[in-house]
Image (tube, coloured by chain):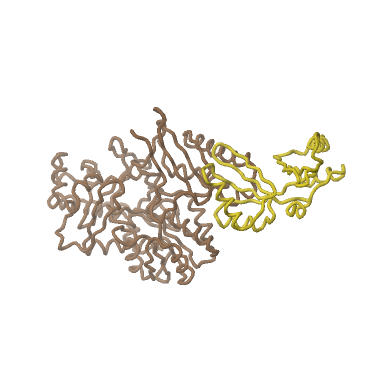
Amino acid sequence: MIYNEEFETLPREALEALQFKRLQQVVLRVYHTVGFYRKAFDDAGVKPEDVKSLADLKRLPFTTKQDLRDNYPFGMFAVPMSSVVRLHASSGTTGRATVVGYTKRDIEHWSELMARCFVAAGLTKNDIIHNAYGYGLFTGGLGAHYGAERLGASVIPISGGNTKRQIMILQDFGPTAICCTPSYALNLAEQGQAMGVDMRSLKLRVGVFGAEPWSDKMRNQIEDVLDIQAMNIYGLSEVMGPGVAMECTEGRQGMHIFEDHFLAEIINPLTGEVLPPGEEGELVFTTLTKEAFPLVRYRTRDVTRLIHDPCRCGRSHVRMDRVMGRSDDMLIIRGVNVFPSQIEAVLVGIDGLEPHYQLLVDREGTLDTLEVQVEVREEAFANADEVKVLQRTERRIVKDLKDYLGISAKVKLVEPKSLQRFEGKASRVIDKRKI
Amino acid sequence: MKVEQISVFLENKPGVLEEVMKALKEANINIRTLSLADTSDFGILRLIVNDVTATSTILKARGFRVSRTTVVAVEVPDRPGGLHSILEALGGEAINIEYLYAFVEKSGENAVIIFRYDNPDRAIEVLQKKGFSVLSGEKLYSM
């Protein structure tokens, strides 16, 4: 199903014409209203009038997270505060928070885009949506909430945390869909099982998961433990929040970027050069309709690739592949680039392991070391009271990490539930290197 | 004539074994015999207890990975050559021993050896045919 058929299936030519018209307006507006952009454009020697086609986008300078931090809190806003109706902020775990603002029209667009996402996931106004994304400064909760209301579905604004209560509500209110991070979905399933609840018999049929990188194998696992269809959503607060891109039930391969609102590019994170179609690199966004917080060539740090093939759902919008990791989360272990999500993919491919793991990076002398700690699964131990069976599992992990990723790691099997559980975004890397 | 043994996966870190023992103490579980296999980062604790079901439930409730495995308990006189006589009896039968551990009965006359065989049924059959005393679970748990 498609929520806004007119815009979501716009033929490529018409879509690009619309994008170009909107891009020209954005560039002109930011140049004249945001001091940062005027200076950045001047420094790069480009004027808004130089944008004569979509191909001229690459002449414009990039905007980085650091630029947003430098202009904390409101320096990047393109409208006066009297026009701003909402503020959100990023968690700021890796530095100063970044603050984003929305006009009334921005909120309307955002609600529509989230409604498009829900419809792409197969939801209708008859669904009850359990929204376990955090409400507050984080964009997840309210973003999904407004989209669900726009669709006309019933929203349970449960927010994050208080897992036991969530499980009670899942049983009693009978929601048919759930929104949260994929790691929290597994956490819910696990705690529900521990409470003796048959998590597969709940009324849930669809999950809309995002806000952190996850693998296809993790998706299979979530679908299995909750007996639902798990759908991948993408977004980031700087660009808007959740609902920048969404997977469709028909294709289930890659997320459609709502191109009438956002322009996407893939660049080489080291050189900044735009990569040919289909190549993997850092995702860069330019917002086309945002009023309060427009962004020109914002470097997301998310590593993915764009899929230009037509999709069977009928949407004309380009798809982005699953996020492989972040160009700044990327671990470099003895010179080999590796993302935690890749390690996760290896681990969930091995029987007998829980998807709960932690990566410890350290340096001995001049050598980087990686220790992978992973929990042993109940069923696996049930037929393995012999040391050799467990050691075989350890060796298998070591071998698979070496074979698939080319990294040498120390593997440690740990007791169940001994690793930290996450209610929001999982952070599985502990880097003790002092470089 | 098989015996159930409790195996517990333990991470190699201080205090873990104490935690298991505390749980057993609180539940008034008595251990007949035990063995602890270790590697550099994990260990497996194997226990013969007076109440297998209760032990399994208690430890699982505390979040331990627990398995119940089938072992064979053989009673031999406590004198030189006791263990050898069993191994000799099984020689040529192509039955593999995964691990074993032993204890001496309270009377001091007999020793009990706990075997984990790859084929326990066959091992019991051979041992009984050759006149060995293979102990039942009930007898062992209540010893």
**Who's the residue at 66% across and 48% down the image?**
B47
Q: In this view, does A265 lie to the left or right of A186?
A: left
Q: In this view, does B30 lie above or below A370?
A: below
Q: Is residue A176 visible?
A: yes
**Total number of numbered discs in the rendering:** 0
Q: Position of residue A159 (x, y in %)?
A: 37, 63
Q: Is residue B118 visible?
A: no
Q: Is residue A321 above or below residue A190?
A: above
Q: In this view, does A47 lie to the left or right of A167?
A: left
Q: Colour of chain A?
A: brown
Q: Chain B is drawn in which colour?
A: yellow
Q: Position of residue A63 (x, y in %)?
A: 23, 45
Q: Is residue B5 above or below residue A291?
A: above
Q: Position of residue A406 (x, y in %)?
A: 47, 33
**Can you say which quadrant of the picture contains the N terminus of chain A?**
bottom left
| Residue positioned most to the front | B107
A373 or A173: nearer the eye? A373
Q: In this view, does B125 lie to the left or right of A332?
A: right
Q: In this view, does A421 lie to the left or right of B73?
A: left
Q: Position of residue B131 (x, y in %)?
A: 87, 44
**Can you say which quadrant of the picture contains the C terminus of chain A?**
top left
A391 or A24: nearer the eye? A391
